[in-house]
Image (cartoon, rainbow, N blue to C red):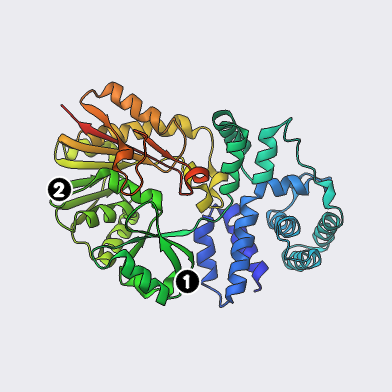
Amino acid sequence: MDAREIALKIINDVTSNHAYANIALVRELNRHKISDQDRRFITELVYGTIKAGETLDWMIGHYVTRSLNKVAPVILNILRMGMYQIFFLSKVPVSAACNQAVELTKKYGHTGTVKFVNAVLRNAGRGPEKVIYPDREKDIVKFLALKYFHPQWMVGRWVKRLGADAAEELCQINNVTPALSLRTNTLKNTREELLDVLNQEGVSAEASVWTPEGIVCHSYPALSTLKSLRDGLFQIQDESSMLVAHVLAPKPGEFIIDACGAPGGKSTHIATLMENKGRVLSTDVYEHKLVLTKENAQRLGLTIIDVQSLDATTLGDHYTRQADKVLVDAPCSGLGVLRRKADSRWRKTEDMFKELPILQMAILKSAAECVKLGGTLVYSTCTTEPEENQEVVDNFLKENPDFALQHAGEMFPVTENKAEMVQLWPHIDHVDGFFISRLVRVK
């Protein structure tokens, strides 16, 4: 099975079986002995084709007369892969993109579909000028959506809220693969010691400017080959995500609840900042995710983390006024981390902004019941949308006068942020989009 056929298999799994692109990619790559060059090509082809899905279908529409709904899914994916290579992979010759697509169609289609795919892709290769994007000035939302591979409703929200130029910058960076970020396990080594170890393992990395334990990697071998990872010298975690535990400011000996804790990135960070002294309760509604929390804690050498399968909306019934601090890293739309998952933008709908705030408020109110007098409650998400962020906190404070808002930005460990409720943006701060707020129980 060659590189393009492997890519096609993964794309079919995502589009037909609703598999997650990153999981399907890793699973399929591990089944084949392939070169690093092919691995990179497959990754680019899979993520690019999935990310550009609606734009590719729009492009194909310039070269066909039939409805794409009448094209078999596997043949449509072959066309999408071919169009992506022709229009967006300049290093791939048009002839190679066409020829390989035809060969795949011979295997997965019939004589008629072979002729169809050949005609569409060769016409596209000969006449790319047929694809004309909407006028930016006349229809900015459609232009940005097609140009940068986003749903129109999503782009429309950002244009209305941020303006056209900022929305374009955000769409652009959502298509850029982010650097890998690591959090030093300070119980086992210092950041400087870890940087030396990583350098010896072939990792090109530098210290983060956001957190004292953060590291940003620019190039690296397969993570599974790194002894430093197996030995628990670090945890993979984005820089903005690392800030959450610093805003919580855990101390040794405290009892802290991480209300939506799996797979354990923030739970293990909290335990590390506590110097592995005290107790961290990491809860999640999904038991299989808590297994990952246990595995991460064990690998990092942390012994104070307990896990419990629990609906976070019922936390207050179990731990009333018992916790020194509680973190609610709430389920959210994930619009701040679109660049990390090629398929996630196409799984979102506007209905989320009606449904999620109800769940987020329920979790926050229940978690608040666990906080002792003088204790801290941190609410965070990995999204950029106000309905899930500032509005949830504002509504909570209106209904819960026993809590007061504190200045979350002042708790940042390296660079202080002036905002009371912090909203980080990928196109401005060059980290994942994240919201962080800090409240204290005053009554």
Left or right: where 20 falls relative to 299: right
The answer to whether residue 250 is above or below residue 11 is above
> Residue 38: image x %, image y %?
62, 72
- What residue is at 65 percent from the left and 62 percent from the top? 8
The answer to whether residue 218 is above or below residue 396 is below
> Residue 155: image x %, image y %?
60, 36
Q: Is residue 71 visible?
A: yes
Give the residue at mark 1: 222
Secondary-structure class at tag 1 = loop
Give the number of the disc on residue 254. Answer: 2
As rendered, which of 35 and 73 lies closer to the eye? Answer: 35
Q: Is residue 311 visible?
A: no
Left or right: where 195 falls relative to 247: right
Quadrant into which the N terminus falls: bottom right
Q: Amino acid at mark 1?
A: Ala
Secondary-structure class at tag 2 = loop
- What residue is at 53 percent from the left and 33 percent from the top? 350
> Residue 109: image x %, image y %?
75, 62
Whichever of labels 1 and 2 marks the residue nearer the N terminus, that label is 1
- What residue is at 58 percent from the left and 37 percent from the top? 166
As rendered, which of 278 and 243 lies closer to the eye? Answer: 243
Q: CA distance from mark 1 to mark 2?
A: 37 Å
Mark 2 Cα-neighbour bin, 10 Å: few <14, some 14–19, many ≥20: some
